[in-house]
Amino acid sequence: MYTSKISGLGSYVPENVVTNDDLSKIMDTNDAWIQERTGIKERRHIKKGDGNSTAVMGVKAAKIALERANLTTDDIDLIIFATLSPDMYFPGGGVQVQDMMDMKTVPALDVRNQCSGFVYSLSVADQFIKTGMYKNVLVIGSENHSGGLDMTTRGRGVSVIFGDGAGAAVVSRSEEKGRGILSTHLHSEGAHAKELSVLGPSTQHWVPEIMEENPQEDIPYFPYMNGQFVFKNAVVRFSEVINEGLQANDLNPTDINMLIPHQANLRISQFVQKQFRLSDDQVYNNIQKYGNTTAASIPIALTEAWEQGKIKEGDLVVLAAFGSGFTWGSAIIRW
């Protein structure tokens, strides 16, 4: 079997910066309240008319990743597109990327695993490459949250957290043993699916029914999150799945050079950092600038950490995510 490695990284965020003070003008909140609970200072939102969408941002990140991998679109054998906010209910964003980038008729696969979407997608890419089926896989995580948030006091508990953006990685075949993606570890627990969800429109509660009901509270097409319950589960599952990955490769927490956690909440990242006794230089967080960008958060953070020279050849890099589903996962990478 072959090994797989990340050969190129790229990211894109909209230019429009939305600060906590900006939000305080449209809902009952303030900078101190948001920072204390989430660590977020600002986020990026698509501005109507700026030309961005989930797929468009994914393409912008993908072009950077391809250039850094010294590859062209002709070299890509498969597109994997992770998002919870596709431009259309169907089809998915993967085929839009294929069209926008004028690619050959390569397969396009969409992954709907929300916050753990990029880790799941990376795992899928890893398997396709290791078995020899594909040589280069384009993995994208992209989100346009701002278009579907309840930007009023009613929705502030969720809406202050999320931002827009995209990240991409090119995963390529390698024959170098002991380098690249060493292993990935994936889990789910659907019993808690409704604790972080958008329940409608759905085939059980479709658009005409919602329009007829015209609800003013508990609107099903806005996100719902049981914040404390999600937090308690996240800190447990983060630690479990990181340990699982380390143990599978006969590694210890002291071997970690860089941990890139999904940027759900700065307090979660700090809790996990403390559990593994990692220094600030061993954990990369950028939620302060971008908020939670769901499937895009890990590739954006990974790209930034690499650009800033915080990830070097030979480093042990650990990716970990937890989110809606519940789903969670980790990836252990020798850079």
Image: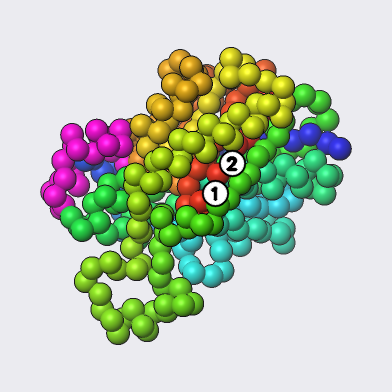
Q: Say if the magenta span includes residue 250.
A: no
Q: Which residue is mark 2?
A: 329
Q: Please give the range of residues in magenta.
A: 21-44
Q: Which residue in the rendered view is the most extreme toward the right?
A: 1
Q: Using the image as rendered, state which of residue 230 and residue 96 is in the foreground.
A: 230
Quadrant of image for the C terminus: top right
Q: Is residue 146 above or below residue 214?
A: above
Q: CA distance from mark 2 to mark 1?
A: 7 Å
Q: Which residue is mark 1?
A: 327
Label 2: few (<14), some (14–19) or many (≥20) C-alpha neighbours in 10 Å? many
Percent of width and height locating residue 131: 83, 44
- Residue 239 seen anywhere in this rendered image of the structure: yes
Q: Is residue 232 above or below residue 246?
A: below
Quadrant of image for the N terminus: top right
Callout 2: SS: strand
Q: Say if the magenta span includes residue 22.
A: yes
Residue in the image at 29% along x and 68% along y: 219
Percent of width and height locating residue 95: 61, 62
- Classify residue 116 as left or right of residue 248: left
- Classify residue 6 as left or right of residue 205: right
- Residue 82 seen anywhere in this rendered image of the structure: no
Q: Are marks 2 and 1 in contact (CB under 8 Å)?
A: yes
Residue 58: mark: none
Q: Is residue 15 above or below residue 316?
A: below
Q: Type of residue at label 1?
A: Thr
Residue in the image at 41% along x and 40% along y: 232
